[in-house]
Amino acid sequence: MIHIAIIGSGPSGCYIADYLAKKLDNAQIDVFDQQPTPFGLVRNGVAPDHLITKNITRQLEKAFTRRNVRFIGGVRIESTPQAHSYCASLTPLELEKHYNIIVLATGATHDRQLDLPNQDIKGTYPSGALAAWYNGDLTQNQHPYIGTKIGIIGHGNVALDAARLLLKTREQLLKSDMPDHVINALTKSQPNRDIYLIGRGSAANAHFSSGMIAEILELPNIACYRTDTNIPEELPPDVLKLIPKEHHRDRLKNLALFRKIPVLNGDLVKIRPAHLPRLTFIFDTTPVKLNGEEQVEAIDLRTSDDTKTRLPIDTLITAIGFEQSPTSLNFTEPTYSVGWCKNGAKGVIQSNRVDAVNTARDIINAVQQSVPCDKIGYHGIKAILDTQPALITSFSDWKRIDEHERNAATEDKPRKKITDYATLTALINAGK
């Protein structure tokens, strides 16, 4: 028997587990995750109002229904063992002792940092951590302050996700799987909210998908503006050189949508229409400095023509990408990696399937050439986990959680997420 450990149960981890399980009859595949629930960012990172995207879990869970795939939730793999309240801890050496092959599917887990003076001031939040909060991630313990004047740095879909969720009404968010306490926090000052979407590049350089722009422009009862007075009809030469040809059409759609947005002339803090939240797209503008003593109070901006502006804000969200972190785990033997931890945070969820299949084929080739079957896999790891008090979950436990959350949902909500460990532990132990 070949024992394979996959670290991470997001899409890449599920795709590669499923393929290996189908092609290797003599393999046991164990998928570890620090979360007590599977599916990674599909559950804890995808915007909670994008329910069609989240429904991909129906496809991903097929891997765990195979006889030779095991989900082991609530286990963190780290080079230095630590005590955690929410998960057990294993080291790379402990995994290597009991598994023949190890696959890293840990994703791009660290928000890229904004290199600005005073960047750590209170009231600033990276988009990944914010997404974990508004998805009810059990491993997070933060309570962001969301004010009424919000700067979002970044011109990609993650930035638009944040803006859209901040603009939606309570009634709209109640149709998502966002936890109730987060909905309360997000909508507290929503009618009086000013959101500034700030990007260094031009409108043609913005990395939004046209569908995401259209979605936010179709929201009722919001005021939307732009600062760029000259949105071109065609893509500029510098953009044509940088963007693959297959993306040109989407960028042209973006420009057409931007041209429909009225220009905000003059002062950026101009009074919005009464009782409507306002979104302003700001192009060709670079953040220079954050201002404030204890709480962020303003951000200094510099435009491409070197005009300087101080924009009053009380909350800043950075959506400038994620860092790859495949080397944070110190293995003595070569490992395989797949997905975002290998290629960076790019592409849609389904695009990870191709990489997973190719990596799985490399593993199958190695197994066919020669991999000694001298290890015992989970039977060796279980003895270590049994000495730790953390809750370890199985796929059967996840199905119980899933059923409970769906049954607890009210009205149009698809599920009512469990957001505390006491409730989760009681539910799992009740089914033992």
Image (cartoon, rainbow, N blue to C red):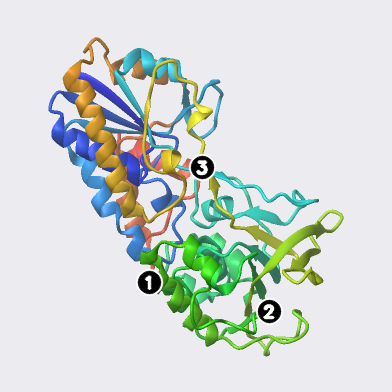
Would residue 265 appear left or right of 109 to someone viewing this image?
right
Marks 3/2: CA–CA distance: 33 Å
Instruction: From the viewer's side, name the closer residue of 86 and 196.
Output: 196
Query: In which quadrant will I find the C terminus?
Result: top left
Residue 159 on image: x %, y %:
56, 63
Residue 173 on image: x %, y %:
48, 70
Question: Is residue 389 shown to the viewer in this render?
Answer: no
Query: In which quadrant will I find the N terminus?
Result: top left
Instruction: From the viewer's side, name the closer residue of 265 and 68.
Output: 265
Q: Which sits earlier in the primary sequence, circle 2 or circle 1?
A: 2
- Of the numbered discs in the image, which one, if any, rests on residue 192? 2
Would residue 103 appear left or right of 199 to someone viewing this image?
left
- 234 over 39 or under it: above or below: below
Q: Secondary structure at mark 3?
A: loop
Q: Residue furthest right?
A: 293
Label 3, residues with CA under 10 Å away: few <14, some 14-19, many ≥20: some
Asked if labels 2 and 3 touch by Cβ distance under 8 angstroms, the answer is no
Q: Which residue is mark 1?
A: 411
Residue 171 on image: x %, y %:
48, 76
